Image (cartoon, rainbow, N blue to C red):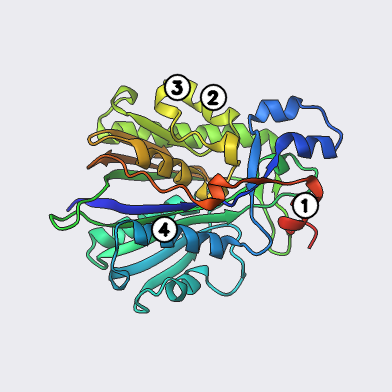
Amino acid sequence: MIVSILAFGRYVPRYRIEAKTIAEHWRRGTEQVEALGIREKAVASPDEDAFTLAWEASEAALRAENIDRKDIGAVFVGSESHPYAVKPTSGMLVTALKLNPFCHAADLEFACKAGTAAIQIVKAMVESRQIRLGLAIGTDTAQSRPGDALEYSAAAGAAAFIIGKSTLRRSGLCSIDSTLSYTTDTPDFWRGTEEKFPSHAGRFTGEPAYFHHVETAAKRLLEKTKLTMRDIHHVVFHMPNAKFPLQMAKKLGVTDAQLKTGFIVPHIGNTYSACSPLGLTEVLQVAKKGERIMLVSYGSGAGSDAFLFTMQRDGVKLPASREETELRRLSYAEYLQSAKVLT
């Protein structure tokens, strides 16, 4: 059985704030901004949350291939900014998307890799023939404490994937050839139950957190699939900033050409659970039949999910949305209000 991504959708809010605007507000120089490599980040509007972003991305995926909504047998939503502590985002999506209510549904949380965890779960359910089609979503309206280093990067966005078996009637876009996870208890980033903003241990953020987990997962995936990095056409890493994935690429021998298509963090920031999935949506629009894609996510706490995909047909270009063509850049005061930082 070949399990594939059949369709995908994405949503990035049109509101943006430039990193230099944040730096100017705090009367800081541009050194930190330049080091992170993020020019601007996407910000949810006052009437948007992780649920509405997920709905937009999922609706786009369902419409892209004219999927019969009654065939969706599972919805898994990865996020660390679910709008309710007790009220499932996934349950709301089943009704809002007009899916079959006899549907497996659950919310996931593993920092920035919960979206890729959703892909793994849906893939397994299709392989085990529990469902025909499933919906895997990564969505976040990430927040940070005003003045914290995370304020330059924490962003908003969503990506959704419809996963199922490739058939003669319904050809897959790309096959999910292999996946694995690497997980440890490495406390580089956390947020307590009653806390609004996350905390982070700066000295753990690179090593032994991001670099160790991403490198270990990527190397094991290559061993498992008996491939080398030269056999991969596109590589997508989790992008907490622009600096880390570039350093990771150098360590693993990934070329600029392999990395560039999915390298979107300078323009939209770190969208947390949607970060590497959104990078994948960029690749799926332009990759050619037969090309291989490696994706390695990262979630603080800490763990990485690694995937190998192979394009079954040429990529599908998504129509440009109003949000992406009519960007609006915010002042710092507008950003505080829009991101609900003060509430």
Q: Residue at x 68, y 55 (%)?
A: 191
Kindly identify which residue carries mark 3: 256
Mark found first going from the N terminus, 3 or 1: 3
Distance between the Cα atoms at labels 4 and 3?
A: 30 Å
Helix or strand or loop: what does disc 3 sit on?
helix
Task: Give above or below for 262 relative to 299.
Answer: above
Report the residue marked by disc 2: 247
* Residue 60 horizontal/vertical position (percent): 41, 58
Which circle's residue, 4 or 3, is located before the other in the chain? 4
CA gap, disc 4 to disc 1? 28 Å
Disc nearer the start of the sequence (2/3): 2
Q: Which residue is mark 4?
A: 60
Q: Which mark is residue 334?
A: 1
Q: In the figure, residue 20 lies in which quadrant? A: top right
Q: Amino acid at mark 2?
A: Gln
Do the numbered discs 3 and 1 sit on residues whose CB atoms are within 8 Å?
A: no
> Which residue type carries mark 3?
Asp
Of callouts 2 and 4, the N-terminal one: 4
Quarter of the rendering occupied by the C terminus? bottom right
Q: Which tag is nearer the camera, tag 2 or tag 3?
A: 3
Q: Quadrant of residue 265?
A: top right
Q: Mark 3 against mark 1, which lies toward the viewer? A: 1
- Could you tell me which secondary element the residue under label 2 belongs to? helix
Answer yes or no: is residue 108 visible: no
Decide if residue 10 is on the left or right side of residue 207: left
For marks 2 and 4, give the CA distance: 33 Å
Q: Secondary structure at mark 4?
A: helix
**Occupied quadrant, residue 28:** top right
